[in-house]
Image: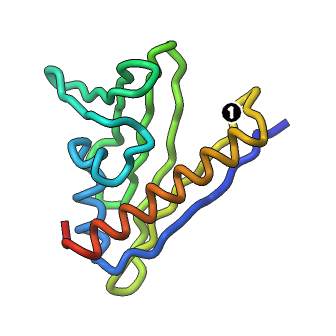
Amino acid sequence: MRPESRHLSVYIDRPVAEVYSFASDPANLPRWAPGLGSLVVKVDDKWFVETPEGRARVMFAPDNRYGVLDYEVLTPSGAKVYVPLRAIADGDGCEVVFTLRRTPGMTDAEFERDTALVSGDLALLKKVLESTGT
């Protein structure tokens, strides 16, 4: 059986290159994705985020011209969570699309909670970029 997923998106009235540049910088995560963690640190060439469960490693897609912002989180328990994220040009602005996947054993309430958290993060990304231009 294929796991359930949801595609959450937001239109941002900024050029796709600007959105990509901001969202692909791990140091900016606390500004727009506080649901992931409160503090991001770089140790050597690796990025980590402080979560309520402990320090998690975050690995980002290599820089690219296609708007691929995917990342993978290695949780403190050792589980890997793949996060598909895209910035897609749309006129003078862009659409940011986040695919939220329901993990095995996740309850309906947990899936709804994660949906709300991701929706909030996308709304914050829009607010930050449209109000300040990064």
Residue 90's place in the image compared with 81, above or below, is below
| Residue 127: % across, % down | 34, 70
Furthest residue toward right: 1
Quadrant of the image occupied by residue 67: bottom left
Camera-nearest residue between 117 and 4: 117
Camera-nearest residue between 103 and 67: 103
Dot 1 falls on a residue whose secondary structure is loop
| Residue 81: % across, % down | 53, 31
- Left or right: 108, with 46 as reference point: right
| Residue 53: % across, % down | 46, 20
Furthest residue toward bottom: 91
| Residue 24: % across, % down | 28, 50
Residue 23's place in the image compared with 2, above or below, is below
x 76%, y 27%: residue? 105
x 52%, y 24%: residue? 80
x 44%, y 43%: residue? 35
Amino acid tagged 1: Thr
Q: Quadrant location of the N terminus?
A: top right
Camera-nearest residue between 82 and 30: 30
Q: Quadrant location of the C terminus?
A: bottom left
Query: Tag 1: Cα neighbours inside 10 Å, few (<14), some, or many (≥20)?
Result: few
Furthest residue toward top: 77
